[in-house]
Image: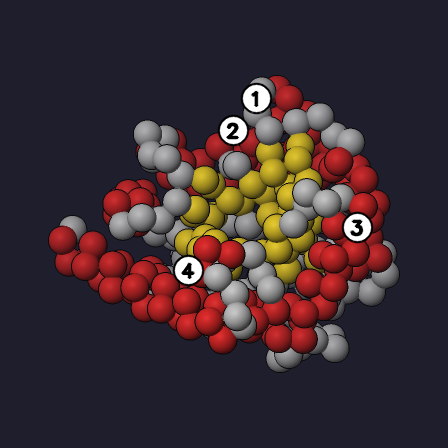
């Protein structure tokens, strides 16, 4: 365990240095960017070590991994982010532990999340996942709503009991006009965020960037970066 703690501490230091350097290059304050550590496939023991090392935000993308991990770490002061594609049959479980759902991309999910949040007597923060590779009315290859669907979802979330509209999220697309152009993709997300905030001023969270492209996300103006491999190492294969 001591070796693992040292390993995580060294990785966290390296990631912190990358974020700090990116902030300096963009003339931003370090405290403007929140690190969310994506712990998928890694055990609750790693989450506990990360918390000891000062991590406050952790993320998961599969409820079957996240639910037992969140339960095992329920004594810790952590904010849990759900970042994966969410099926409505998993909503009730996710609503019991997640503080923020970063992957809201359809009206049916808004309705389900609202009902689950009210039932659990909790307030869930919601990010609209934007697919920059999606045509109007379609969903992206990696989930998300096309940019012209943002406003409809924002209105629905804003009016849904138990939900709070926090902002936008994207994953750098693998296809379409922004494929291989992470900086341009994240800058486009910031433009969409500005438009959203015109009608929803409190929805100022912008989640973008992962281990490979966090610098581009910080340069564009992201408020949150989702980092897994650079902190925890290369994930073991599932199955």
Eyeballing the image, is 88 above or below 59? above
Disc 4 target residue? 228
Which image quadrant for residue 109?
Answer: top right
Mark sitting earlier along the chain (2/4): 2
The kind of secondary structure element at disc 1 is helix
For the C terminus, give its image quadrant. bottom left
Eyeballing the image, is 236 above or below 198? below
The kind of secondary structure element at disc 4 is loop
- Is the residue under label 4 in contact with that under label 2 (CB below 8 Å)? no
For residue 120, the mark is: 1
Disc 2 target residue? 96
Label 3 and label 2: CA atoms lie apart by 31 Å
Label 2 and label 1: CA atoms lie apart by 6 Å
User: In the figure, is residue 85 to the left or right of 16?
Assistant: right
> Neighbour class for label 4 at 10 Å: few (<14), some, many (≥20)?
many
Disc 3 target residue? 198
- Is the residue under label 3 in contact with that under label 4 (CB below 8 Å)? no
Which image quadrant for residue 238?
Answer: bottom left
Mark sitting earlier along the chain (2/1): 2
Mark sitting earlier along the chain (3/1): 1
Q: Nearer the viewer, residue 26 or 109?
A: 26
Mark sitting earlier along the chain (4/1): 1
User: In the figure, is residue 183 to the left or right of 134?
Assistant: left
């Amino acid at each position: 365990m001591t070796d693992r703690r040292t390993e995580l501490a060294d990785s966290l230091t390296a990631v912190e240095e990358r974020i700090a350097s990116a902030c300096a290059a963009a003339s931003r304050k370090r405290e403007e960017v929140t690190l969310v550590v994506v712990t998928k496939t890694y055990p609750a023991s790693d989450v506990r070590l990360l918390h000891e090392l000062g991590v406050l935000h952790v993320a998961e993308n599969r409820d079957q991994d996240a639910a037992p991990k969140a339960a095992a770490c329920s004594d810790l002061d952590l904010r849990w982010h759900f970042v994966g594609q969410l099926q409505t049959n998993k909503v009730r479980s996710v609503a019991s532990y997640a503080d923020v759902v970063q992957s809201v991309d359809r009206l049916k999910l808004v309705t389900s999340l609202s009902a689950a949040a009210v039932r659990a007597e909790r307030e869930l923060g919601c990010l609209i996942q934007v697919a920059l590779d999606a045509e109007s009315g379609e969903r992206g290859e990696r989930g998300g709503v096309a940019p012209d669907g943002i406003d409809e979802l924002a209105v629905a979330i804003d009016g849904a009991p138990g939900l709070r509209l926090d902002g936008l999220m994207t994953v750098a697309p693998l296809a379409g006009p922004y494929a291989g152009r992470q900086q341009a993709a994240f800058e486009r997300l910031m433009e969409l965020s500005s438009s959203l905030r015109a009608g929803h001023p409190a929805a100022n969270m912008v989640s973008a960037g992962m281990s490979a492209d966090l610098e581009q996300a910080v340069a564009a103006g992201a408020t949150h970066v989702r980092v897994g491999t650079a902190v925890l190492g290369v994930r073991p294969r599932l199955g």
